[in-house]
Image: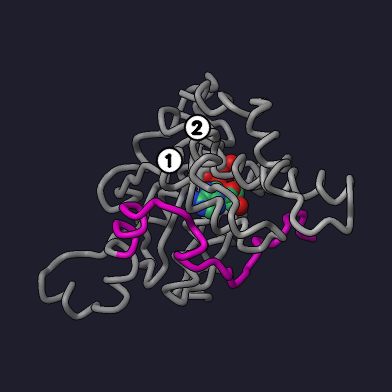
Amino acid sequence: PSCMREAALEIPQVRWEDIGGQHETKQLLREAVEWPLLHPEAFQRMGIRPPKGVLLYGPPGCSKTLTAKALATEAGLNFIAVRGPELFSKWVGESEKAVRAVFRKARAAAPAIVFFDEIDALTIKRGASGSSTSVGDRVLAQLLTEMDGIEPLVNVIVVAATNRPDVIDPGILRPDRIDRLVYVGPPDLVTRGEILRIQLRKTACASDVDIDILADRTDGFSGAEVVALCQDAAIEAISEDPDAEFPVEEKLLRATGAGQVVGRLRNYE
Ligand code: ATP
């Protein structure tokens, strides 16, 4: 009997246009993932191997997961999502099996992206726990085996995400493994404006809401915090007057003014 949960297979519905800003990230990923899939013969002719893996790193809530999903949606790839900590199992040996199962599934679903969120959980530097044969080490070894593959990874791309690139075992980042590192940073002023615009498109909100002021006042917010702000304002507006027409703007301004969320991101580093 298997005690493991199946890795979820889903077809994401995130378009590039749903992600504010991050233009450079989007471009880098298209080059690394889409081009080799669209032009395999060109890569062969040039004698270069398409990348097997990409690491997205940066502070929480700033669109790493969203980006991985958009990549799958836009390139027409299946998407297998695994959270690093999920792979750890209390039963000896099950964790490696779980890693094998993920890759088996990915090969069967190719072309596909395997998305390892919180990859730092399974690649804490070897030996960090003191013992040389910890579960973490064996899971990592299994991951490396899968990527180096006797069975080649055909049209399977590993996308990993972490807030803590510093604790990742360097072995995993070596050439021909997860060797493209892409920083996904906090949203700047323009990006916050775009996120607000994307979010407020769906909200009963006056058309003259001053996005620029809101973008300015949300300095230090993560993308997720900007989205949460819009949702909180909408909920507050509904609770005060469910029939009001455009109550959201004032709430937004008040919420940003309150400064509750401001600064949380600044403490990251
Ligand atoms: P974590 O490290 O916590 O897993 P993450 O970087 O993977 O975070 P996401 O899960 O991609 O972050 O983002 C969380 C939510 O924040 C998204 O579902 C989305 O609603 C919002 N968000 C963050 N950044 C953006 C952005 N640039 N454009 C639009 N929405 C964003």
Residue at x 54% of width, y 22% of height: 129
Residue 189 tag number: 1
Label 2, residues with CA under 10 Å away: few <14, some 14-19, many ≥20? many
Q: Is residue 205 left or right of residue 69?
A: right
Find residue 157 and report its horizontal and vertical position in percent.
40, 63
Q: Is residue 65 visible?
A: no
Q: Farthest residue to the left: give it.
A: 46
Given contact means CB atoms under 8 Å apart, are the residues at marks 2 and 1 in contact?
A: yes
Q: Quadrant of the C terminus?
A: top left
Q: Is residue 23 left or right of residue 191?
A: left
The span from disc 2 to disc 1 (Cα, nearest Å) is 7 Å
Instruction: Identify the image's colour scheme: rainbow, by chain, secondary structure or one colour.
Output: one colour
- Frontmost residue, 153 versus 263: 263
Q: Quadrant of the N terminus?
A: bottom right
Residue at x 50% of width, y 71% of height: 73
> Residue 45: within the magenta?
no
Residue at x 67% of width, y 44% of height: 228
Q: Is residue 19 left or right of residue 9?
A: left
Find residue 123 and report its horizontal and vertical position in percent.
48, 37
Q: Which residue is mark 2?
A: 219
Amino acid type indicated by mark 2? Asp
Amino acid type indicated by mark 1? Leu
- Frontmost residue, 139 versus 36: 36
Region of the chain picked out in magenta, as a range? 1-30
Label 1, residues with CA under 10 Å away: few <14, some 14-19, many ≥20? some
